[in-house]
Amino acid sequence: MSPLRSSLRPWGAALAALLSLAACGDEEEGPTTPPVDAGTNMPGADSGTDAGTDAGTDGGTPRPSDPYADEVVAFTPGDGAGFGQDRFPGVVLGPPSGVGPDNGSLDVLSLGREGSITLRFTDVGVVDGPGVDLLVFENAFAQPGGRTFSETGRVAVSEDGTTWRDFPCAAQDADAGYPGCAGVRTVQANPANGVSATDPAVAGGDGFDLATVGLSRARYIRITDSGANGYGGTSGGFDLDAVAVVNGEPLPGASP
């Protein structure tokens, strides 16, 4: 999703239409998802926090105290990338900056057509626990009619940074909501609103279960633009906000 286009949504309809012509003039229209159950993405009363390992649990598994990616291992931008590079790498590290279902965050890095980024966790690794183990946050936003403007990405994980397991991603299957892809669901989690980025029930974003690819743990995640999105200007393709560990454990040598 184009972060430039999403930033216009809070304005009035006439002004937004006028400004979008100037800001997004050469950007192609990206894919949209069919209507989804908004209840699965909206904040709940018990949103939890990320303050420590006892801040919340999922099926008895403590949530990690530092659940976010720590390092960028590699970034290969594709055509149409550029947005967010002035704040790189910090823009993709740390918590997501979701602004709810009707807006897309500008705290993102645009990967461009088939661009790719590899991130590493250095203190808390992902482990296969109950349900979703990892969340990936883009900046999708809701559109009139119950649809969502989405730009999809393929996700792969690795324990050693050499051998990778790819999650299946149906980037052309809009009717089914792009099953297996990142960049589909809107993002609610934001440090400013108290919505936990490690609770799949309220955080938004797209969840991934290591059991799907036959791994028990992972320390690396790679996200690649699917090549099936809108491209133009410097905000083309998948826009990465953040990644967060849901089920994790301290890595050897990590500080407590």
Image (tube, rainbow, N blue to C red):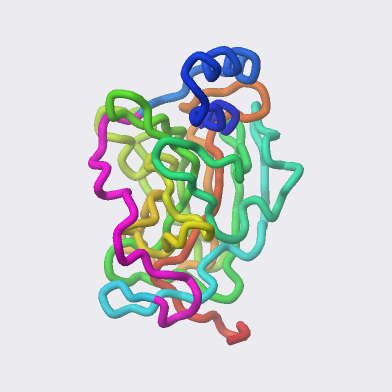
- Camera sees residue 221: no
Residue 59 placement: quadrant:
bottom left
Q: Provide residue 22's location: percent of width, then percent of height.
A: 65, 14
45 magenta-colored: yes
Q: Provide residue 21's location: percent of width, then percent of height.
A: 59, 13
Q: Residue at x 23, y 41 (%)?
A: 37
Q: Residue at x 36, y 54 (%)?
A: 207
Q: Provide residue 104's location: percent of width, then percent of height.
A: 50, 38
Q: Which residues are magenta?
A: 33-55
Q: Is residue 4 left or right of residue 89?
A: left
Which SS does the magenta portion mostly show? Answer: loop
Q: Is residue 170 left or right of residue 22?
A: left
Work out which quarter of the rendered image holds the C terminus and state it. bottom right
Which of 104/215 is in front? Answer: 104
62 magenta-colored: no
Residue 82 placement: quadrant:
top right
- Camera sees residue 22: yes
Q: Is residue 219 left or right of residue 74?
A: left
Q: Provide residue 97's location: percent of width, then percent of height.
A: 54, 51
Query: From what the image shows, is residue 205 above or below residue 122?
Result: above
Q: Residue at x 60, y 57 (%)?
A: 119
Which of 200/98 is in front? Answer: 98
